Amino acid sequence: MLFFLKLFFWFALFIVFYSYMGYGILLYLIVKIKGKKKFNQLVNSEENLPEVTLIVAAYNEENYIEAKIENSLKLNYPKDKIHFFFVTDGTTDTTNERILNHKNSFGACVQLFFQPERRGKIAAVERIIPFVETPIIVFSDANTDLNRDAILNIVKHYQNPKVGAVAGEKRVNLSAEAAGAGEGIYWKYESQLKKWDYQLYSVVGAAGELFSMRTELHQPVERDTLIEDFVTTMRIVQNGYRVGYAPDAYAVEGHSANVKEELKRKIRISAGGLQAIWRLRALLNPFKYGVLTFQYVSHRVLRWTLAPLFLPIILFLNYYFIEVGAQPQHIYVILFWAQLFFYASAILGWFFEQFKMKVKIFYIPYYFCVINYSVYRGFMRLVSGSQSVVWEKAKRA
């Protein structure tokens, strides 16, 4: 019995390590051996640029919408080839008025879509898709700023006919607070993984802050989908296309006001991730999807399932091995104290956040624990049916 428990312990430890670090190391080595992917260069001629529609879904964004409009106006793309769609279903503040005040700045390329009923982002966006007449759609959040060449750097990837969607890079303003430090470091690591994922085969899902797709490939998702950007792009890959990655097209947003606000986002994302695993279960077949299954399981599935589940099991088994004198004893003692030190650092991170003490090194284990805790909360919301499809916005710093 003890032998099988030890075997399971080392398997669980490997899964946790692989989910957060091992896959990145392995992916780097594979890409290094395989060589970097050669991308076609965009021809510097306006005649060769496709028309695009930038869709911004906004709900009560009066504090951000004018900055978003001004940022959109400055995008380095031919004005006669970019159309701006703002959809604001259910908005009750001055967002609509602020958009209409800038309508003349856009000329004939801007359209405001509004209906009083709020049924969520998916319903709002899919309601306006039939009005899109351009071959490329770009989605962006209202509270993000895009770099000037974002659209240019996205559309060049569509020169490859195998690319069905392109993910931009999400950048979070770093800060000394727990939320900013943890979230910023997390997204830097995620961005690096996406670069390597694309060099190997395809990005495993896109973030809603900035991504695009071929209009012809758009398919409606279930109305109760919690992370529609991820499911939408993964179904494009499932249909034989690839999701490209454009790190030189990025969306910048402020970090969550605090970890409590960040937890709101993570719980929803975790619930959505578990929901997506079931709805995208066909991708778990390596005989059909090959390298995509490897990427999907390694980068996403394990983080939303086994890794958080194994963390407490590893700690309790480790303590049990010490108590029964499992050999080699010194290894289990070292691992046990290493775990205690890590979790103690996370507790200190929580303590320092409460008292606004900026000690960044403790915020990393704290944020790691928050991410994994959110999976348990997300699972409970998903099975209880209490997670609404309507976003509960997290306050930003």
Image: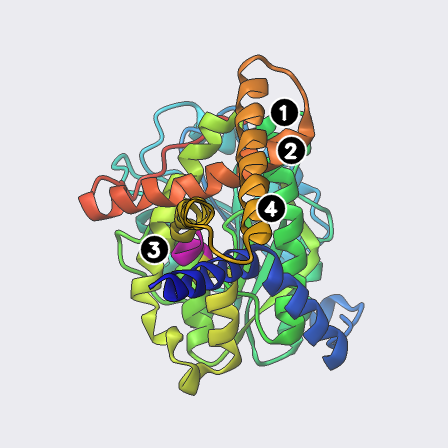
Residue 154 visible somewhere in the drawing: no
Which mark identifies residue 181?
2
- Local crowd at mark 2 within 10 Å, few (<14), some, or many (≥20)? many
Q: Which residue is mark 1?
A: 177
Residue type at numbered disc 4? Ile
Q: Which residue is found at the position 54% from the left and 50% from the top?
A: 332
Q: Nearer the viewer, residue 291 or 111?
A: 291
For marks 3 and 2, the one nearer the N-term is 2
Label 3 – label 2 distance at C-alpha: 26 Å
- Callout 4: SS: helix
For marks 3 and 1, the one nearer the N-term is 1
Q: Which residue is mark 4?
A: 334
Q: Which residues are magenta?
A: 303-307
The image quarter containing residue 246 is bottom right
Label 3 – label 4 distance at C-alpha: 33 Å
Q: Which residue is mark 3?
A: 274
Q: Residue furthest right?
A: 44
Q: Nearer the viewer, residue 317 or 18?
A: 317
Asked if the residue under mark 2 is in contact with the one under mark 3, i.e. CB atoms within 8 Å, the reply is no
Q: Position of residue 372 (x, y in %)?
A: 44, 44
Q: Position of residue 293 (x, y in %)?
A: 46, 75
Q: Position of residue 383 (x, y in %)?
A: 21, 48
**Is residue 223 shown left or right of residue 52?**
left
Residue type at numbered disc 3? Leu
Q: Which quadrant would the N terminus be assigned to in this image?
A: bottom left
Label 3 – label 1 distance at C-alpha: 29 Å
Residue type at numbered disc 2? Ala
Label 1 – label 4 distance at C-alpha: 31 Å
For marks 3 and 4, the one nearer the N-term is 3
Q: Which residue is found at the position 58% from the left and 26% from the top?
A: 349
The image quarter containing residue 82 is bottom right
